[in-house]
Amino acid sequence: MRIKKFVAHSLKEATDQMKAELGPEAIVISSRKTTRGGPFNFLGRDAYEVTGAIDDTPPAAQNTYRRRSGGGGFDRHLEQSRASIDEESALAGLRRIAEHFGERQSDDARPGPTGRRRPEPAEIVELRTDMEDVKGTLKAIVEHLKYSRMPALPDTLQKAYGRLVQHDVDERLAADIIQSVYARLSQDQMTNKTYLEKQLLAAIAGIIPTADTEKSRRKKTRVIALVGPTGVGKTTTIAKLAAINKLLSGLEVGLISADTYRIGAIEQLRTFAGIADIPMDVVYKPVEMGAALKKFRTKDVVFVDTVGRSQRSKKELYDLAKFVFAADPDETHLVLNASTNVKTCEEIIDQFKVVKPNRLIFSKLDEAATYGPMLSIIHRHHLPLSYVTTGQAVPDDIRRVEASQLAAMVYSGEMAHA
Ligand SMILES: Nc1nc2c(ncn2[C@@H]2O[C@H](COP(=O)(O)OP(=O)(O)OP(=O)(O)O)[C@@H](O)[C@H]2O)c(=O)[nH]1
Ligand SMILES: [Mg+2]
């Protein structure tokens, strides 16, 4: 990529100069009127400054996506073309430069040894303005590169990529999804918006594993524990599940609370148990779990509510694990708030591994601005998704997720109807 500034008496003149020198494909990254001195500001006339850029990577090298003749699925070992690597490093380089400018600026703003801010000579002020310009230009270039990583793709697919990224799907995952669709479609199919979206949703759904909870009557009691950080909605979700299992599926249900830590936790579940007429027991120590389960041995399903723990406290997580292992659950669902950022979710999943969860529940979808982060997390961890919760109402605001439904939510950014 080449970048250059052009100054002339009019915007058009400056843009024409840019096109003449960089070529007709050049793009304007920034333009402004400048009143500062210089050869173009003689006799008090205004001057116009245009910063242009041209991506002069040879077109053949720009397409980082190879078509495959075979069917769908992800090819995780895509060969990265040189152009893509160059673009990546250019992007990283630009970011570093932008950060460097940021640091330089904050260094300049720091007070001098006397504690007082030094007065700024005119050149420094001018330099600062220039730096602001450069920073703005770099930012524009970074944005441009970010959204033009797939220059050789048809417009429809580029738009689809932009939409996924806009909905917070990880850029690399979004590119993988788009690539898998691209590899599958003919040129005609790619320009057919309806067909393309159908394929795209299928590709997204393909990376969402889901898991059903056993509903049928079993000879053996099914034990289901919910674990997760504080306040994500474990107890509320258990109330929803218990009510559905009893009222809709007609199953015999038992409740065990192992949360003797938080004030009011037992009362919270007890109140619900009273209303729903579901027997409940409290377990204060892991050794008491066996007796509680024995009491409920004739039940079809027993839900175990656990204490909310920070993923950052290893000791607390080990204590929690003792309760969970004592219950020896058939299913251990890790509950994550859908609004929690991807990094924190990653940390939670990693740290909660000591409890051996085998299902994932995303709670509070009604509060999440986008659903892309959920997709990134599901894709990385391959823990099957059992439920999502969509509000505080017991038992209505919970649903088992169809992968296709969640795919549509990720892509559209809107909650699917139940
Ligand atoms: N908006 C919204 N609120 C929810 C949802 N699920 C639970 N809540 C609310 O979140 C708050 C905490 O819910 P709890 O069920 O007590 O959460 P918890 O994970 O058991 O909390 P601790 O036991 O303290 O760790 C309550 O006000 C719930 O009503 C949901 O899907 N959407
Ligand atoms: Mg709770």
Image (cartoon, rainbow, N blue to C red):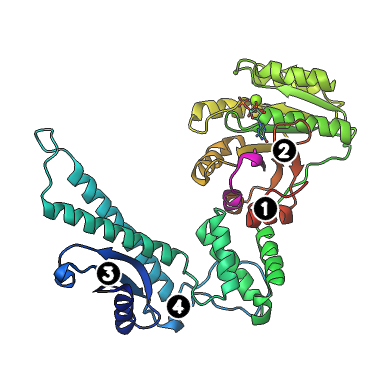
Residue indicated by mark 4 = 62
Span colored in magenta: 357-376
What is the crowding at mark 2: few (fewer than 14 residues within 10 Å), some, or many (at least 20)? some
Q: Which mark is residue 263?
A: none
Number of numbered labels in the structure image: 4
* Structural distance between the alpha carbons of marks 3 and 1: 46 Å
Q: Is mark 1 within 8 Å of ligand 1?
A: no
Instruction: Please indicate, yes or no, whether residue 25 appears anywhere in the rendered image.
Output: yes
* Structural distance between the alpha carbons of marks 3 and 4: 33 Å
Q: Amino acid at mark 3?
A: Tyr
Q: Amino acid at mark 2?
A: Glu
Residue placed most toward the observer, 306 or 1: 1
Q: Please, what secondary structure does the residue beneath circle 3 have?
A: strand
* Structural distance between the alpha carbons of marks 1 and 2: 26 Å
What is the crowding at mark 4: few (fewer than 14 residues within 10 Å), some, or many (at least 20)? many
Q: Nearer the viewer, mark 4 or mark 2?
A: 4
Q: Nearer the viewer, mark 2 or mark 3?
A: 3
Q: Please, what secondary structure does the residue beneath circle 4 have?
A: helix
> Marks 4 and 3: in contact by CB < 8 Å?
no
